[in-house]
Image: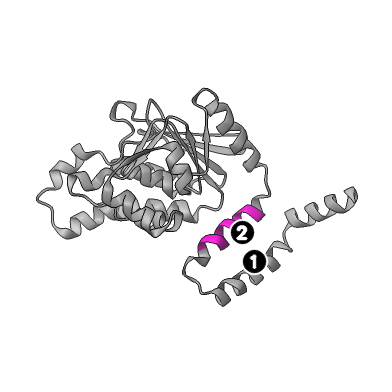
Amino acid sequence: MASYQKILYQVDGGVARITLNRPEKRNALDAEVVAELKHAIASCDQLILLSGTGADFCSGADLSGLQGMFEAGVLDHMSSARGMAELFLAMRRHPRPIIAAVRGRALAGGCGLATAADIILAAESAKFGYPEVNIGFVPAMVMAILRRSVSEKRAFELIAGGEIIPAQTALEMGMINRVFADETFDIEVEAYASKLAQKSASAVSLSKHLLYHMDSMGFEAALEAGVEVNAIARMTEDYRHGIEKFLKRS
């Protein structure tokens, strides 16, 4: 198992737990954190539970590390940004669900990291937002995901206004999936992840791939892709066992 410096990684009960481990920096993202996240995600085929140590999920990019790039050229900036884009793509391509468990603040790139997960579970006191506009910056890569999570007008309001919103507002926008009480958050998250991890691995993997693969498809092409996945699903061991179990109960 790889040794990581800025994240924690543990597999337990069919769940891979990846934890941002820079509490002194509010789990800010730098190149090393992004590289370690990509490696950890690529190294496992279990459901992933993504969280942060300390009070916050993730405060966004480590701005102190970006100071040295004031004189960099456009190609250097693109190379730096591409690391985050590759992380979002790795999360989208991971065969199993990725759950972001958000306590405290998920801001800027940290909000983008949560949004890139398949499911977001939040404590009721959690905060979300894209405040990049307040320092003349743009939450550029995450727009590809945010635009698919909320309406166009909601997405524009979030990125142009830079407002930090509470978990309940994020839930009402459709930005996150569930809000749990702070006092029971850890227990609720564990129960949710455990229950989802017990679902058919092949069915969930095929469903995730098909859902995201449909992004760029027209209606007829999406239906045809559904036909193909339907046929593949019927040939899996999980489907065979599921049907046999169902028929025995009937």
Magenta segment boundaries in residue numbering: 203-212
At 41% from the left and 35% from the top, the residue drawn is: 3
Query: Is 192 located above or below residue 87 in the figure?
Result: above
Contact flag, marks 2 and 1 (Cβ < 8 Å):
yes
In the image, what residue type sits under mark 1? Val
> Is 227 in front, or is 139?
139
Q: Which numbered marker is on residue 206?
A: 2
Please tell me which residue is depicted at 11% across the width and 48% down the height of the picture. 70
Q: Is residue 101 above or below residue 132?
A: above
Instruction: Characterize the magenta stretch by its predominant secondary structure.
Output: helix
Q: Nearer the viewer, residue 41 or 58?
A: 58
Q: Amino acid at mark 2?
A: Leu
Residue 229 bears which disc, if any? 1
Colouring of the image:
one colour
Q: Residue 41 at what x, y percent from top left?
A: 47, 46
Mark 2–mark 1 Cα distance, whole angstroms, equals 7 Å
**Magenta segment includes 23:** no
Considering depth in this image, is 207 or 32 the residue closer to the camera?
207
* On screen, residue 198 above or below 126: below
Most extreme residue toward the left is: 71
Q: Is residue 39 left or right of residue 198?
A: left
